């Protein structure tokens, strides 16, 4: 039963006050910024950071110029706060009238004074109580929150979307956006536009799931519309004409596998053309031969889909990878800009998805303007401009033999935000240069059936961890010219997994790095102008804002995202051992005078030797399979933790069957984010212990 606010006389009075207040102050009195379609589309105001990508355009470009090329070298720490209850921090904070809102581990939302960090309120959605086994997917990451008028919106791991009063921190409404039986989850930021809140979900790899996005009324949480990304079983009837059209591009009994396409990131509202763009996910399972055995493009996988923001009705789409089979989803940022191409102004959208091509698309009709490789690409030679489709290279689909393919499922570019500076005309992209091997030999392609809550791809994939470049560089920050379709400059990194970018009207570019440094560059030339070491791998993008005439650069520091969980040894080598390093929110300014607070030095955990545990090789082999299905996503490839969860090779808990049972089956550490695996048998628990201890022995036998 829903409570009616209007039935409450006090609430009625409040509403009256709000209406009168709105009449008197609707011309944006200082300190009372309205958060609506007008202000979120306003590129000129720089004090606030109202939306995920600052404004609706998702450019992450700020007009603020107090911090400039000449003085950025003197940027100093103004304030910071410790976030001891956090692990992964990957989100973009939002700022309104001197208040900063941000989401941290376990989806806890805080409002703090943006000039001091003093906490105003904290909202804890009690994720551990709600999420249970859903914590097995999307481990601890949330990329952000949304704002609209007097509310802030948080989407939780377990699929709830919650509206909170942004002045009091009180919950106003909550709604469940995911069937609790399905292995789906939310890591994305809600996208707010026209009084609606849009949210998608992840889960393509966690079971036979079917992706969708849902829009809710910002005031009440009532569902406004839903758009399914892939068609269901035709026998059940299609939800709309778009699904009927999409079904023509699938073969076999695709619905048995869910189809996937989950939209977990990459939503952009276009206030000028009044369209919402959805970046869609890859197929479930990954292997196209299983999912759609007689071929087919599989709409609307790996696409940018334009929808009517009022109804969710399909308008147009552009598919980046027809018949996708390498986890090349199109969930990356969709950035809007007016570009002058061949002398004509084009309303463009820019998109650099996992597959390694940089796309410029006419957003009035979805027509491809250009597509160029921004990293090493082996799966296609080019995009045919006549058809808009990729020209694939032979052997890359692992049809009859294994294949080595670039980019990898981590992407040539992942969700780490790219930014666009209209002054320089350049896009700034964190780029990865890796290849992966693919092999489905031995798979029962016709009998394959994925299950909820088990990670399955329908193919073996291994990232080589070697660079695809002659110079061996694995990660770069690059400036890309979307009009001339070429790279302008690049800066090699000392690894991969650097975070998203921010650019300003002073032609500055800011980025946090996996090695713990935050840097500022000249956005035109790539020359480095400033650097601070913040004591922990950075995975969140910086923001900038201004209060009382002082410009700040803010950033969350907390190692996170998929590679920080499952990346194995290359990520472990950064030394961000689980639990060692302070998680913090930092704000810098030219008037700042604080020293960077100390942090623990990098450390690589040492596997725990024990002569008491005798490894049984047969059990360890069985354990490897169980580990890959249940544990790898958080505890890391081949049991090497990359830092977001404990390194099990260093854990004494593994040595005790009783302690192991309490944690894994009993959920003793669920408040820390360790989900209970209550369905595990004694045998499963035992074989996993043998596999982990086998990996310890292998590590101890290998000379360092
Ligand atoms: Ca995926």
Image: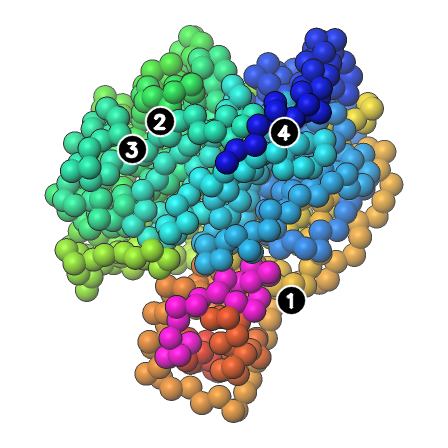
**Which label's residue is closer to the chain start, 1 or 3?**
3
Tell us which disc is closer to us: 3 or 4.
4
How far, Cα to Cα, is label 1 from label 4?
A: 41 Å
Crowd tier of the residue under label 2, counting other residues whose Cα lies within 10 Å: few below 14, some 14–19, many 20 or above: many
The residue located at (84%, 48%) in the rendering is 595
Q: Determine which residue is flagged by label 4.
A: 151
The residue located at (57%, 35%) in the rendering is 173
Residue at disc 2, secondary structure? strand
Q: Is residue 121 above or below residue 278?
A: below
Residue at disc 1, secondary structure? loop
Q: Is residue 52 left or right of residue 290?
A: right
Magenta stretch contains residue 537: no
The residue located at (85%, 33%) in the rendering is 591
Q: Determine which residue is flagged by label 3.
A: 300
Q: Between 39 and 601, which is closer to the camera in this rendering?
A: 39
How far, Cα to Cα, is label 3 from label 2?
A: 8 Å
Expressed as whole percent of the image width and height from the top left, the position of residue 28 reads 72, 13
Main SS class of the magenta portion in the image: loop
**Which label's residue is closer to the chain start, 4 or 2?**
4
**Which label's residue is closer to the chain start, 3 or 2?**
3
Q: Do the residues labelled 1 and 2 touch (CB within 8 Å)?
A: no
Expressed as whole percent of the image width and height from the top left, the position of residue 206 reads 36, 53
**Which label's residue is closer to the chain start, 3 or 4?**
4
Q: Between 544 and 76, which is closer to the camera in this rendering?
A: 544
Magenta stretch contains residue 680: yes
The residue located at (37%, 69%) in the rendering is 626
Tell us which disc is closer to us: 4 or 2.
4
Q: Is residue 610 visible?
A: yes
The scheme the figure's colours follow is: rainbow
Q: Determine which residue is flagged by label 1.
A: 603
Crowd tier of the residue under label 3, counting other residues whose Cα lies within 10 Å: few below 14, some 14–19, many 20 or above: many
How far, Cα to Cα, is label 1 from label 2?
A: 44 Å
């Amino acid at each position: 039963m829903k409570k009616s606010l209007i039935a409450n006389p006090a609430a009625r009075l409040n509403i009256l006050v709000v209406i009168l207040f709105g009449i008197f102050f609707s011309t944006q009195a200082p300190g009372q910024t309205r958060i609506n379609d007008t202000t979120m589309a306003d590129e000129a105001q720089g004090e606030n950071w109202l939306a995920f990508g600052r404004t609706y355009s998702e450019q992450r470009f700020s007009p603020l110029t107090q911090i400039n090329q000449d003085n950025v070298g003197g940027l100093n720490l103004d304030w910071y706060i410790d976030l001891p209850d956090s692990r992964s921090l990957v989100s973009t904070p939002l700022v309104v009238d001197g208040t900063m809102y941000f989401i941290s581990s376990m989806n806890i939302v805080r409002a703090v004074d943006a000039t001091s960090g003093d906490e105003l309120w904290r909202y804890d959605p009690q994720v551990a109580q709600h999420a249970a086994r859903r914590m097995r997917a999307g481990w601890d990451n949330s990329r952000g929150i949304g704002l609209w008028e007097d509310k802030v919106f948080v989407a939780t791991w377990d699929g709830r979307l919650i509206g909170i009063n942004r002045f009091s921190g009180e919950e106003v409404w909550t709604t469940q956006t995911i069937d609790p039986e399905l292995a789906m989850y939310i890591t994305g930021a809600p996208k707010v536009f026209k009084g609606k809140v849009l949210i998608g979900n992840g889960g393509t790899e966690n079971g036979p799931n079917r992706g969708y996005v849902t829009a809710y009324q910002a005031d009440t949480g009532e569902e406004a519309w839903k758009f399914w990304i892939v068609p269901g079983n035709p026998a059940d009837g299609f939800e709309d004409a778009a699904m009927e059209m999409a079904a023509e591009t699938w073969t076999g009994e695709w619905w048995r596998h869910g189809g996937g396409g989950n939209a977990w990131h990459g939503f952009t509202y276009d206030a000028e053309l009044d369209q919402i763009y959805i970046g869609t996910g890859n197929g479930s399972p990954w292997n196209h031969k299983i999912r759609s055995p007689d071929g087919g493009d599989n709409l609307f996988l790996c696409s940018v889909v334009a929808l009517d923001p009022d109804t969710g009705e399909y308008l147009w789409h552009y598919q980046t990878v027809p018949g996708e089979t390498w986890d090349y989803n199109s969930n990356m940022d969709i950035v809007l800009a007016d570009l002058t191409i061949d002398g004509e102004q084009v309303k463009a959208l820019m998109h650099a998805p996992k597959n390694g091509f940089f796309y410029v698309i006419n957003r009035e009709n979805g027509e491809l303007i250009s597509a160029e490789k921004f990293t090493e690409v082996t799966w296609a030679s080019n995009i045919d401009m006549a058809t808009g489709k990729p020209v694939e290279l032979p052997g890359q689909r692992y049809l009859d033999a294994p294949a080595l393919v670039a980019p990898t499922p981590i992407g040539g570019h992942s969700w780490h935000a790219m930014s666009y500076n209209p002054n320089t005309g350049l896009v700034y992209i964190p780029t990865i240069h890796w290849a992966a091997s693919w092999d489905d030999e031995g798979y029962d392609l016709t009998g394959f059936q994925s299950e909820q809550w088990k990670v399955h791809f329908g193919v073996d994939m291994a990232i080589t961890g070697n660079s695809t470049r002659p110079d061996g560089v694995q990660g770069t920050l690059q400036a890309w010219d979307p009009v001339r379709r070429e790279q302008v400059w690049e800066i090699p990194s000392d690894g991969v997994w650097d975070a998203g970018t921010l650019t300003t009207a002073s032609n500055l570019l800011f980025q946090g790095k996996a090695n713990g440094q935050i840097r500022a560059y000249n956005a035109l030339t790539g020359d480095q102008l400033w650097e601070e070491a913040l004591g922990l791998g950075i995975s969140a993008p910086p923001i900038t804002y201004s209060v009382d005439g002082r410009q700040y650069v803010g950033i969350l520091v907390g190692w996170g995202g998929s590679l920080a969980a499952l990346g194995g040894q290359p990520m472990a080598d950064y030394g961000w051992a689980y639990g060692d390093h302070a998680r913090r929110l930092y704000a810098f300014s030219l008037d700042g005078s604080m020293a960077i607070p100390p942090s623990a030095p990098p450390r690589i955990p040492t596997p725990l030797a024990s002569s008491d545990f005798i490894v049984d090789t047969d059990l360890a082999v069985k354990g490897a399979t169980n580990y890959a299905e249940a544990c790898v996503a958080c505890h890391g490839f081949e049991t090497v933790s990359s830092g977001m969860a404990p390194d099990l090779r260093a854990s004494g808990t593994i040595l005790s069957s009783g302690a192991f049972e309490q944690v894994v089956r009993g959920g003793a550490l669920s408040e820390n984010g360790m989900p209970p695996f209550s369905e595990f048998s004694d045998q499963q628990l035992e074989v996993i212990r043998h596999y982990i201890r086998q990996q310890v022995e292998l590590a101890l036998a290998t000379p360092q």
